[in-house]
Image (cartoon, rainbow, N blue to C red):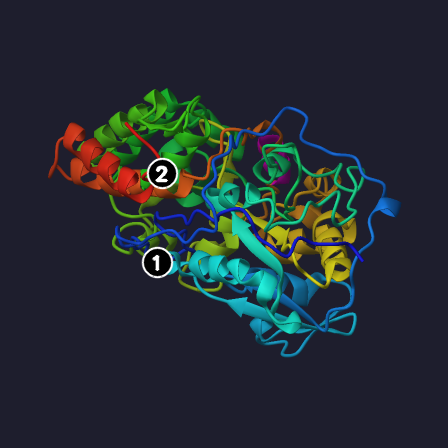
Amino acid sequence: MKKIKKTLALSLALAMGLSLVACGEEATTVADNTEATTVADTEADTTAPDDTEATVDDADVELDGSGAVINIYVWNDEFANRMKDHLPGYEAANPEAALDGGTYNGVKVVFNQVDNADNKYQDNLDAALLAQADAAADDKIDIFLVEADYAKKYVEQQDFVLDVNKDLGITDDELSKQYDYTKQVMTDVDGNLRGVSWQACSAGLIYNRKIAEEVLGSQDPDKVQEAVADWDKFFETAATMKEKGYYMTGTVNTTMRVYSNNSSKNFVVDGKVAVPDDIKKWVDDSKKMIDAEQSTAQGLWDGDVVTKGFMKDPGNVFCYFGPAWYFNFCLSADNPDSIAADGGWGFVVGPQSYYWGGTWICAAAGSDNTEQVAQIMRDMTTNDDVMKEILQADSDCVNNKNVLDEMAGSDDGNVALLGGQNPWAALAEGAENVDASNLTEYDQGTVESFQQSMKAYFDGESSYDDAVAEWTKSVLEKYPNLSE
């Protein structure tokens, strides 16, 4: 049986920012006086080296399958539903409630679900990981999920997270169809892979076909792409939309990740906090749009303009920026009053390729079910048949180049809420262009709080300098190890 360290020696530096939220949920801040629970303080360079893949012989890894319970930590029911609907060997206890768990090849599966609001999911997970060494066998974490904005927090805690290659025996050849950026996100400073994903969350511009036809003279994706091909054309089109009585976007926050993903610098460089030039450009561009009433400063999921733009009435928002998960999770296709219900959206790349979000599967150190965990990770992220099912049933852009290529050339890949359009070639191209090498453990606490701080400036209640000063103060309170 593979030996696992019983002493968890490294710290879990708790993320203190705004929690990520699903569509329609409201983001809330974590109290400034929240303190990190640590075993020992540690710092690491989180930039992945160029050679991020290790080679392992399956015969060198002896896995453990002795556990009676597979415990999986999640913040919503997405992964539970993916397992219920697509994982070979899995039987759900309740087909109508995926979080009720089930059995995997005869082994009981239990989901521990705590939502993301107020950092509750990470707090719960951190406490459980810190107690893992002393936990009863049936209570030990086997799998936990992470999102891109805080993935590095866990990737670099190497005594908490198993190595996909060396500890689980999943080889580079098995992972060869996955996009490089999805591996960059989960690669530690020593070049070891610590998690895998079934998703490739490259993203683009989702536009209202009816408005495009009226204002641009065509709803054809090629024609719409010409109107938003770069930021200059995007803002020209925004002015035209305003003249016709439409918002270009429901909120300027929808474009933030396009700018940040394409920024040459992060908010934190060498332990110092500063606003990169590319993000300052986002602020300037956003302020102009707000002042021209082409967009608003509302939050991503506010109802006044943003979510009402998903509906036929008023249906007055031209476009949103998002990945494939935006299709089903945000556009309300199951609501007959929504634009999506009538296939009223289209998809183009927009001004720049980027990505947003994604969910990664991690195996917890101390698991007594590594055999089952490894097979779940294989089937959920490398099995072509499972990947194809997920794409067709759930409109997920899957992390599999072969499947995306196949679906891009087939009517089986057409998406109803996009008016039958097939978006997979564009999303696959975007996934190839994503560079996630500059992710840090501070992304969640800096990016989202920056948007919140800028709202006062956008609304004319603060100067830009004062808003930045307020943001800097909040970041340094959350991360005392950083400086200006």
Where residue 86 appears, x then y in whole percent?
A: 71, 62
Element at label 1? helix
Which residue sits at x=62%, y=72%?
136
Front residue of 14/117: it is: 14
Image vertical order of residue 482 relative to residue 323, above or below: above
Q: Position of residue 322 (x, y in %)?
A: 46, 42
From this viewpoint, is residue 246 visible?
A: no
Residue at far bottom of view: 94
The quadrant in which the C terminus is found is top left
Q: Which quadrant is the N terminus positioned in? A: bottom right
Q: Which residues are magenta?
A: 424-430
Amino acid at circle 1: Asp
Q: Which residue is mark 2?
A: 447
Which label's residue is closer to the chain start, 1 or 2?
1
Relative vertical location of residue 430 with respect to residue 327 in this rendering, above or below:
above
Crowding around mark 1 (Cα neighbors within 10 Å: few <14, some 14 to 19, many 20+) is: some
Residue 310 left/right relative to 5? left
Indicate whether residue 427 is drawn in magenta: yes
Residue at x-position 25% and y-position 54%: 304
Left or right placement of residue 228 versus residue 161 in this view: left
Mark 2 element type: helix
Q: Nearer the viewer, residue 249 or 57?
A: 57
Q: Which residue is mark 1?
A: 118
Whether residue 101 appears in magenta in the rendering, the answer is: no
Is there any visible trace of residue 270 in the rendered image?
yes
Q: Amino acid at mark 2?
A: Val
Magenta stretch, main secondary structure class: helix
Q: What residue is at 71 percent from the left and 53 percent from the top?
A: 377
Q: How many marks?
A: 2
Q: Position of residue 263 (x, y in %)?
A: 42, 25
How far across and down, in percent of the image, does residue 9 sit? 55, 48
